[in-house]
Image (cartoon, rainbow, N blue to C red):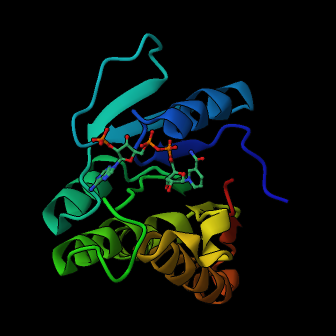
Amino acid sequence: MPSLNGSVVLVTGANGGIGTHFVHDALARGAAKVYATARSPRAWDDERIVPLPLDVTDGASIAAAVAAAADVTVLVNNAGAIPPSASLLDVTEADIRANMETNFFGPVLLARAFAPVLAAKKGSILIDVHSVASWYAFGGAYSASKAALWSATNSLRIEFAPMGVHVTGVHMG
Ligand SMILES: NC(=O)c1ccc[n+]([C@@H]2O[C@H](COP(=O)([O-])OP(=O)(O)OC[C@H]3O[C@@H](n4cnc5c(N)ncnc54)[C@H](OP(=O)(O)O)[C@@H]3O)[C@@H](O)[C@H]2O)c1
């Protein structure tokens, strides 16, 4: 298993409940620096935490994050959203598409954008945050987006393996 010792971690959705824990736990487990990214970055009380703007649905924002954080060795695709309705019959088409943008296209495009950065250091890590809803379809569009991300993670694991990049999917519950 790769180690977090001396790693440089980037967390998406770092202002959220679980994102904030990823930031603090990465440092507690040996990370040297954490980019705490968010649509509206906030101040942190630790000089090892670097706030960075990142909207995972915006290609220009992703490109800017790659340029600003070219030393990343651990990418945590944590940002996620829940559509207003758990019913695929009732939710609006716009909300289905928006949820796929955040929960599927965002993490996949981030993995693609950071691929050269991760591949540059053997033992780098990609962590995708799925959900128990990837397995259980109670969440409608949310479950579909997390199931799609789960599948993408499995494909990325195969593609990143020859580059020495470790890929993990987290079925949060
Ligand atoms: N909590 C659970 O029980 C649970 C269970 C299963 C899976 N998960 C997954 O775990 C992850 C974290 O969940 P959480 O409970 O910590 O939720 P949360 O507190 O709502 O945090 C989610 C974060 O994602 C950010 N986000 C949403 N859209 C974004 C975008 N376009 N660009 C960048 N950031 C965006 C939000 O940013 P803003 O602050 O700007 O809105 C927020 O900070 C999510 O992927 C979620 O689906 C959580």
- The relative height of residue 55 versus residue 85 in the rendered view (above or below) is above
For the point 29% across and 38% down, which residue is it? 52
- The relative height of residue 41 versus residue 121 in the rendered view (above or below) is above
Q: Quadrant of residue 124?
A: bottom right
For the point 71% across and 25% down, which residue is it? 28
* Residue 35 percent across, percent down from the top left: 42, 38
Q: Foreground: 132 or 38?
A: 132
- The relative height of residue 55 versus residue 133 in the rendered view (above or below) is above
Q: Quadrant of residue 133?
A: bottom right
Q: Foreground: 152 or 99?
A: 99
Q: Foreground: 168 or 118?
A: 168
Q: Is residue 150 left or right of residue 5?
A: left
* Residue 109 percent across, percent down from the top left: 35, 75
* Residue 49 percent across, percent down from the top left: 45, 25
Q: Is residue 48 left or right of residue 94?
A: right
Q: Foreground: 35 or 14?
A: 14
For the point 43% across and 36% down, which residue is it? 16
